[in-house]
Image: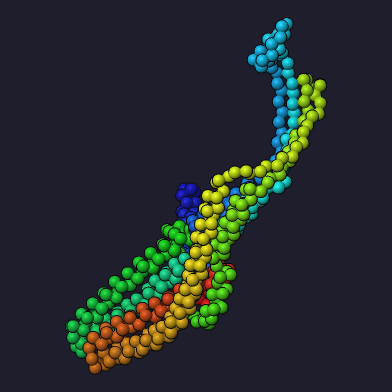
Amino acid sequence: MKRDHYLFVLLPILMAFSSVGIAQQQTPYRLTLRDAIEKGLQANLSVLVADTQVQEAEGTRTRRLSEALLPRVNAEAYANYQNRNLRAFGISFPGLPTVVGPFSNYDFRLYAQQNIIDLESYRGWKASEQAVQSKKLDYQDARDLIVRAVAELYLTAQSAAARIDAEQSRVNDSQALYQLAKSKHDAGTATGVDLLRSQVQLANDQQALLVAQNDYKQALLILARNIGMDPGAPIELAEPLRFQSSPLAQVETVVGSALLARDDYLSLASQRQELVDDQRASRARYFPKLSISGNYGELGRSIGGIEGTGVIQGQVDFTIFDRDRSGEAQEIASRIKRVDDQIADLRRGIEQEVREALLNLESTSQQVTVAQQGQDLAERELRLTQDRFRSGVTNNVEVVTAQDELSRAQENYIVAVSNYVDAKFALARAAGATEKNIDQYLESH
């Protein structure tokens, strides 16, 4: 009985804690745009791959430095026990045994080698340094692209959420119209057609609301997938779609700064310098190479009889004939030309992106103003037609038509604001240093 009493007392408490845990698990995560960007930078595959490429390039640079420019030291030790067939070496005298031995010897030795002059290896190492710099710029460019992509996905979800609000507002208006038509029909001041028309309008608006809700959920799924969150995790946007105007910059100013800040453009410049160093390394193949090497150790027939021996020597190498260098020089020259063409094309592309973003900012800003005016006028028209129908001056055709006009005006406003915000993010990408300067665009978002 006591156990049953305890269970009776503890069961409600356990159920309460369980319900609290379930409620906590189901509480959606309020995701800001800044949170989404940070999560995307941590989890996106493109960023992770670019980071490994930086590490790989740094490993290549270290390997080139150690192989040709740093001293190489190794140790060797051996103990030998052997006999020799003198006749096999052409030694044969009367009375001399054919096989001598066995005898042993021991050798413990250090070997060292250092290149003193090797311009080819030095230029190759300098080229690897430029490769590391290029990969670092590619890595930062990948991060900037992810900032742009995540901002676009977040904006898509914001637009979908704004459409839910617009459709919900329309459903509310349709419900009010239906209630009014039903009251007037019951009072005998409205026809059955008015009542049926309001029911059809309400059904259409409810379906549109369901479609908007599904679009919003799909937008959240895509956003979660691209920022490394579990697609099944409940999230909601902490920042609604809104319009906040930003001052326009001069095209020449933005283009000039973009050429100094765009990591993809700077990466091509580093790639070109890498090829120039490879070209110098290729030319240096005909230059003499000077190196020094030596060894020192203990050598003897027995452990007790070993004595110190060593050698030090200098070596100069010359390349007399190497037809391969001409082919290598042709390869490098063609690569430099290709990179020059890419740099020129990207320079034009950056200017185009900047000009497009600024044009879109100016145009969409004006579109937002016009769309806001149209939305205000459509709301006034809807109120007037509702009053006319309520007063019995007309049927509800005018109300339904006004609702359609308001819906169109709301969609125009959502599209205009979305395009304006997207133009700001496009300008952030075009201007370069997107991750570094994104805060100034988020403040006006």
Position of residue 344 in the picture relative to residue 401 (left or right): right
Residue situated in front as seen by the camera: 104 or 245: 104
Residue 213: quadrant of the picture: bottom left
Residue 93: quadrant of the picture: top right
Whether residue 332 is visible here, answered yes or no, is yes
Q: Residue furthest front?
A: 320
With respect to residue 254, does 379 lie above or below? below
Q: Residue furthest left?
A: 192
Whether residue 17 is visible here, answered yes or no, is no
With respect to residue 363, does 352 lie above or below? above
- Residue drawn where x is 54% and y is 65% of the image: 265
- Residue drawn where x is 59% and y is 59% of the image: 273
- Residue drawn where x is 68% and y is 46% of the image: 288
Query: Residue 184 placed where, x, y %?
Result: 23, 87
With respect to residue 86, does 179 lie above or below? below
Residue situated in front as seen by the camera: 378 or 114: 114
